[in-house]
């Protein structure tokens, strides 16, 4: 018994164009990946700096001086420490490193590019993690202040 396909199979004439489009798209993603990490690090740095400044001023102008000890002190100091770690991690994305690249060897260029991308991505992830912890710490400090 033979199965007959009633609809004829059409040849997709746009396949080469689609393949070219995705190759070019991939090239652009690779070319812009390090710049994107730099931009994210700048944004994290700006947010952490603003939060650090606002929190520092809020604590400075509060009536908490000399009245906080033990766990309450940890609660109020933790956001400052976490935001400073965030700022340091964000800044590490921009620390210059010296890479010796043999541009005649594409494998060496690719390996160095990937190494740079991995180190910047790690720094951005660390900064993001500590920024999230700092925001949680800020929320805990506000709740502690209001309750306490």
Image: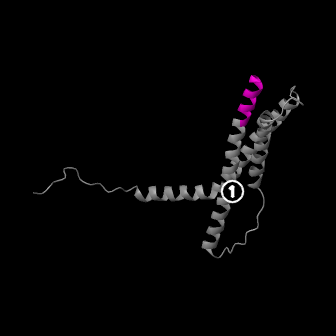
| Dot 1 alpha-carbon crowd within 10 angstroms: few under 14, some 14 to 19, many 20 or more | many
Assess whether residue 119 is covered by the magenta stretch.
no
Q: Which residues are magenta?
A: 137-148
Residue 9 percent location from the top left of the image: 26, 54
Residue at 74% from the left image edge and 50% from the top image edge: 90
Residue at 35% from the left image edge and 55% from the top image edge: 12
Residue 30 percent location from the top left of the image: 60, 58
Judge from the rendering whether residue 107 lies leftward or rightward of residue 82; answer left or right. left
Residue at 76% from the left image edge and 67% from the top image edge: 98
Tell me: residue 112, above or below residue 125: below
Residue 86 percent location from the top left of the image: 74, 46
Tell me: residue 119, above or below residue 132: below
Tell me: residue 20, above or below residue 6: below
Assess whether residue 146 is covered by the magenta stretch.
yes
Q: Nearer the viewer, residue 74 or 132?
A: 74
Q: Quadrant of the C terminus?
A: top right
Of all residues, the one furthest to the right in this rendering is 66
Residue at 16% from the left image edge and 54% from the top image edge: 4
The residue labelled by disc 1 is: 120
Residue 46 seen in the current view: no
Judge from the rendering whether residue 133 lies leftward or rightward of residue 84; answer left or right. left
Residue 68 seen in the current view: yes
Q: Nearer the viewer, residue 88 or 41?
A: 88
Q: Secondary structure at mark 1?
A: helix
Q: Nearer the viewer, residue 109 or 124?
A: 124
Q: Mostly what secondary structure, the magenta segment?
A: helix
Quarter of the image where one finds residue 103: bottom right
Q: Quadrant of the N terminus?
A: bottom left
Of all residues, the one furthest to the top in this rendering is 147
């Amino acid at each position: 018994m033979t199965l007959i396909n009633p609809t004829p199979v059409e040849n997709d004439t746009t396949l080469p164009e689609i393949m070219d489009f995705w190759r070019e798209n991939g090239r652009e993603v690779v070319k812009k990946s390090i710049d994107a990490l730099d931009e994210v690090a700048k944004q994290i740095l700006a947010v952490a700096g603003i939060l650090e400044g606002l929190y520092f001023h809020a604590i400075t102008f509060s009536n908490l001086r000399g009245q906080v000890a033990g766990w309450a002190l940890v609660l109020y100091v933790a956001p400052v420490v976490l935001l400073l770690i965030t700022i340091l991690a964000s800044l590490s994305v921009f620390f210059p490193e010296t890479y010796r690249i043999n541009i005649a060897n594409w494998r060496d260029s690719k390996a160095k590019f990937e190494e740079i991308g991995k180190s910047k991505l790690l720094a951005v992830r660390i900064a993001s993690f500590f920024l999230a912890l700092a925001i949680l710490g800020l929320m805990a400090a506000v709740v502690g202040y209001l309750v306490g």
